[in-house]
Image (cartoon, grey):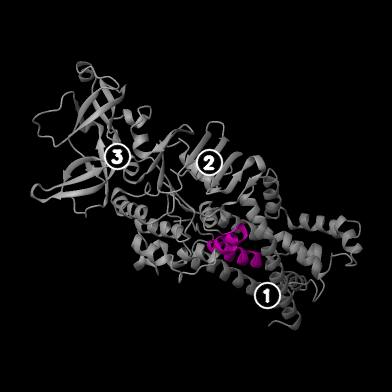
Amino acid sequence: MTENIHATFKLNYGAFQLDVDLHLPNSGITVLFGASGSGKTTLLRCIAGLQHAPHGFLTINGQVWQDSARGVFLPTHKRTLGYVFQEASLFTHLTVTENLQFGLKRIGKSTAGEALPPILDLLGIEHLLKRMPENLSGGEKQRVAIARALALNPDLLLMDEPLAALDSKRKQEILPFLSRLHQTLKIPVLYVTHSQQEVAQLSDFLVVMAEGKAIAAGSLSETLSRLDVPLVQERDAVTVWQGKIKAHEVAYHLTSIDFAGITLSLPAMDASIGSPVRVQIFARDVSIVKEKPQATSILNVLPAVITALADAQAGQTVVQVQVGGQMLLAHITQKSAVLLALQVGMGVYVQIKGTSILN
Amino acid sequence: MLNAADIDTLWLTFKVASIATVLMLLVGTPLAWWLVRSQSRWKGICNALVALPLVLPPSVLGFYLLILMGPQGVVGRITTELGLGTLPFTFAGLIVASVLYSLPFVVQPLQAAFAAIGERPLEAAATLRASPVDTFFSVVVPLARHGFLTATILGFAHTVGEFGVVLMVGGNIPDKTRVVSVQIYNHVEALEYEQAHWLAGGLLLFSFTILLFMYGVLKTPVTSQSFK
């Protein structure tokens, strides 16, 4: 993985301290995940230059945006970034078109340029161009705000909980756009959220923040299956596998999906062979058997190796297993773990009772 | 009816108020912006200084201005050095006094309008490559337009309505410093009530119309043009 964003920040507000040193990929969506007060928004604002961390070092693809040791601090308007705030923050005195052109005018491009039409199309906002922001719904405003940031074709797109201010219906309206964005654009995105659903659906690279520190950073599947990350202990712990559609079993209404050599059979999907798929597997839907079951109604039974075990709350054990090249979590009872005498390094079979497809 | 001298005072009043308003906007805009944005510990003192004319008797302000701008005053010595002479009882002196006296009526609506804009539009503009100066003219000014309108109207109207400071600093010199409010005083002193009625009634109508416009048409003089 190319790691072309290096961000180091130290900031002390007394009650709150930010102290991070991160190497982030310069492609795909990197999600900064954490509870409120964990410092994820502060980190994003430091990267944007909206907040000036007294000790900081930040390079994006070799450009230095901040180097406190050498007294370098590029003001926000000189950073080639795009920023989407939690509230759309459109300029209320300008039409949608004028909002979209605001940044373009300042980098010497007009809307006649080729940048805008595909973005309008991607976000479905062509019909809104002449309106004033006050005449847009919350979801429409946020789509315009995303388009406004994307129009500049930034080197880095920063999104600060862009869906948090919207009700769940509006969220569902925008999430597909973000997923599409992810597949069509090459701009690296730093995306702040406290929603596990958005993590599962959008992220390629995941940074988990707590109390001003990055407690875990790595690829989505790697970070999601780390047992020392708090979300793994919770009831809705989840792993996400990214694969491709391999074949359709029309007679059974099933689709087989290939994840780097492992195949899962899932309910039929309306997508062509070869298209990318994200599947989320809840740890509570995974069970472990020692011997290969001879006859079972569960279709997805795969050989696995136990790589780690940890106690979770209330008589639960989290088992981390490796299935082919993928990591998977299983929540089982502590009693089962003892009865099966599960140990690290042991070969077992995992039965996946259910999955949900994310896109 | 109005005689020629009355017309002259009206014209002079209009000139003083217009020039003073332009100067107040030029001085008041950066001042108000600084007062809203700054974290400086001088902010409180500056706020208090700007607001002083609201509570001081005009004679107090006039008295100190006379002393400051007079031949022995700091300002007076500087203006004399510069070959401008001393400012009291001149048109320029009247303008200086008017600007100081009416400044809070310009600065305060602007302050309220700037504060209502908040941080977010400025940040959004910065992320869209607008420099701070660019942001001020392309985002702050249009969003604060009601504040500017209110500041202009109040600054102008208040300058037209001043009396005490004018009398102290400007005196009562025809064509130079004799403004409408002073002329009304002259008429009343001379028991020319009819002349006084015309001017006083005119000012009353003018002031009422302006206030009606602000509260009636603009509804909220300083709207919260907050960000949506």
Nearer mark to the viewer, of 1 and 2: 2
Which mark is drawn over residue A240? 3
Q: CA distance from mark 2 to mark 3?
A: 26 Å
Per the rendered image, the range of residues in magenta is B130-158
Residue B220 spot, x, y in % from top left: 50, 61
A165 versus A149 height, above or below: above
A163 versus A14 height, above or below: below
A332 versus A216 height, above or below: above
Q: Is residue A105 left or right of residue A88?
A: right
Please state the chain letter of the residue tagged with numbered disc 1 in the rendered image: B
Amino acid type, mark 1: Leu
Q: CA distance from mark 3 to mark 1?
A: 82 Å
Please state the chain letter of the residue tagged with numbered disc 2 in the rendered image: A
Q: Which residue is mark 2?
A: A7
Quadrant of residue A141 within the rendered picture:
bottom left
Amino acid type, mark 2: Ala
Q: Which residue is mark 1?
A: B199
Whether marks 2 and 3 lie on the same chain: yes
